[in-house]
């Protein structure tokens, strides 16, 4: 075991348990899974089954006391720990660490009068959305209900409602944190200002968050859904999309998708085995106002499938129809400096629409609004200056499909390189490179805070802050 300095690069070696899991099991009440267990391969993997993460052990914690015990055990034995509540956020940065599954931490306390929610680390967005549905209040959820509220927020959190309210991380009021020494503290803007800043978008490198309190926002009625058209209308629809989003109010979020739909039985017949265009919508306001704003899209052609209507908050995570079961996939994104006819032509020309195969999706998310406004109260996630984000998502049903899917993604990236920004929000990268997420000044500040709060590198995040900080629990 070596100790370098807490932000080191990843090695390809993995710490052999050497029997430590038996002692760890005596310290915690939740199950400890080791490489010798028959279900190890199932337990060690994250939600994205394409990421072959190789931790030293997996602990299914049952309480905050288990988290404290695991962190203290790691300190005593030259190991590192990483939170991965329900599997999202898998990267090779966690190789050799003890992964803490926090899904059993399910406390959820909502104070409607105060407009706040206290959310434990295992609570998923679908749980919070369902609990708030019908109240007119909401957190700032993303496109899927499956990730945890805490994990999504630590990565910054690009929400459906972010054009109106900004990044999810910036509505956090406090964190309950287990430090690298195994102490439980409450982190607020006043009690630990630097740490509070780092946790809001800097990821899981600074401690194990067991719960957090967030401010709720008033959304009122939500109107939206998904509409789908034949790919024959792609160019016209994307141009109409550019027109709609160029002047859209902050209450309107519209995402456009060019997608290759596989020929599988669970897909509706009108779109099965075809390339399609999809438009996803949420609007915080009346149906009449929404339809007026979306008129340029309806003028192109009648959709082949789908309709818009009132969407209960409980169903917002279903609009984008993202898979919830663990899935092998390629996930990436780029920020775009604009979205005009030139970019539309470049995108459609390079996708090379042809025979359907794997589920391939190329999406344009409209950002802007509150996403683009900076404030001295922002966390490490900051703001997003670019007005659009290009999202890639391929589900790889067979290993031989991975290479052509990656080649297509790489081709789109090359074609749109003149129009892309310099970084990408954390939750849209399935690799471990923090320098592609944060500007240099933010990364320097995060590194300084990491050295202060975790000088031995006991806590492992899924993004590596740099090559000059120690990580324990790796062998060379």
Image: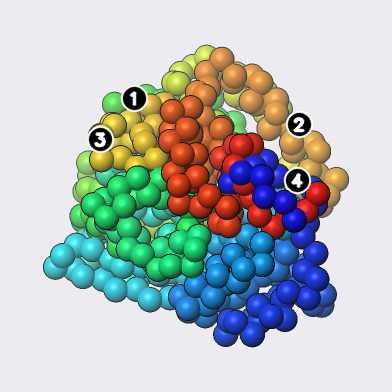
Which of the labelled discs sits on residue 430, or is there none? Answer: none
Residue 462 or residue 297, whichever sits in front: 462
Q: Earlier in the sequence, mark 4 or mark 3?
A: 4
The residue under label 1 is 246
Would you say the residues marked 2 and 4 are in contact, meaning their CB atoms lie under 8 Å apart?
A: no
Residue 8 or residue 323, whichever sits in front: 8
The residue under label 3 is 376
Total marks shown come to 4
| Picture quarter with the N terminus | bottom right
**CA–CA distance between discs 4 and 3?**
37 Å
**CA–CA distance between discs 1 and 4?**
45 Å
Q: Is residue 51 left or right of residue 439?
A: right
> Looking at the image, which residue is at 38% across and 76% down?
107
Against 432, residue 321 (above or below) is: below
Would you say the residues marked 1 and 4 are in contact, meaning their CB atoms lie under 8 Å apart?
A: no
The residue under label 2 is 407
The residue under label 4 is 11
Q: Secondary structure at mark 4?
A: loop
Instruction: Give residue 432's position: percent from left, percent from top.
Output: 63, 43
Q: Earlier in the sequence, mark 2 or mark 1?
A: 1
Residue 257 or residue 103, whichever sits in front: 103
> Looking at the image, which residue is at 64% across and 42% down?
8
Q: Nearer the viewer, mark 3 or mark 2?
A: 3
> Looking at the image, which residue is at 27% across and 44% down?
165
Instruction: Give residue 427's position: percent from left, percent from top.
Output: 52, 46
Instruction: Give residue 169's position: percent from left, percent from top.
Output: 36, 49
């Amino acid at each position: 075991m070596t100790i370098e300095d807490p932000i080191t690069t990843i090695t390809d070696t993995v710490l052999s348990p050497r029997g430590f899991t038996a002692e760890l099991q005596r310290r915690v009440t939740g199950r400890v899974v080791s490489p010798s267990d028959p279900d190890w391969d199932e337990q060690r993997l994250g939600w994205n089954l394409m990421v072959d993460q190789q931790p030293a052990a997996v602990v299914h914690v049952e309480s905050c006391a288990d988290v404290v015990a695991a962190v203290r055990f790691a300190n005593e034995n030259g190991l590192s720990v990483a939170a991965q509540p329900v599997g999202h956020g898998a990267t090779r940065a966690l190789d050799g660490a003890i992964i803490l599954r926090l899904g059993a931490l399910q406390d959820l306390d909502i104070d409607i009068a105060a407009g706040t929610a206290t959310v434990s680390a295992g609570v998923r967005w679908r749980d919070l959305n369902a609990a708030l549905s019908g109240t007119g209040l909401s957190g700032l959820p993303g496109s899927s209900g499956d990730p945890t509220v805490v994990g999504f927020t630590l990565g910054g959190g690009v929400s459906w409602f972010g054009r109106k309210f900004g990044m999810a991380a910036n509505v956090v009021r406090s964190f309950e944190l287990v430090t690298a020494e195994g102490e439980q503290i409450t982190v607020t803007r006043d009690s630990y200002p630097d740490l509070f800043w780092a946790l809001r978008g800097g990821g899981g490198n600074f401690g194990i968050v067991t719960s957090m309190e967030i401010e709720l926002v008033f959304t009122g009625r939500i109107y939206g859904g998904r509409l789908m058209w034949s790919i024959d209308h792609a160019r016209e629809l994307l141009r109409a999309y550019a027109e709609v989003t160029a002047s859209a109010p902050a209450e309107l979020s519209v995402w456009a998708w060019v997608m290759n739909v596989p020929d599988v039985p669970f897909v509706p017949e009108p779109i099965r085995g075809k390339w399609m265009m999809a438009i996803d919508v949420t609007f915080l306001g009346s149906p009449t106002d929404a339809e007026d704003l979306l008129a340029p899209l309806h003028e192109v052609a009648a959709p082949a499938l789908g309709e818009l209507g009132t969407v209960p908050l409980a169903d917002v995570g279903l609009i984008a129809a993202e898979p919830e079961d663990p899935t092998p996939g390629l996930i990436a994104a780029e920020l775009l400096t604009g979205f005009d006819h030139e970019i539309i032509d470049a995108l459609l020309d390079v996708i090379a629409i042809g025979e359907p195969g794997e589920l391939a999706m190329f999406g344009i998310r409209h950002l802007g609004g509150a996403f683009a406004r900076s404030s001295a109260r922002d966390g490490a996630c900051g703001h997003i200056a670019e007005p659009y984000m290009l999202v890639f998502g391929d589900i790889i049903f067979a290993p031989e499909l991975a290479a052509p899917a990656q080649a297509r993604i790489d081709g789109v990236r090359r074609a749109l390189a003149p129009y892309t920004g310099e970084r990408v929000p954390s939750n849209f990268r399935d690799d471990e490179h923090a320098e592609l997420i944060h500007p240099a000044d933010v990364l320097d500040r995060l590194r300084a805070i990491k050295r202060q709060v975790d000088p031995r590198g006991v806590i492992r995040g899924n993004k590596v802050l740099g090559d000059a900080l120690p990580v324990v629990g790796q062998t060379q």
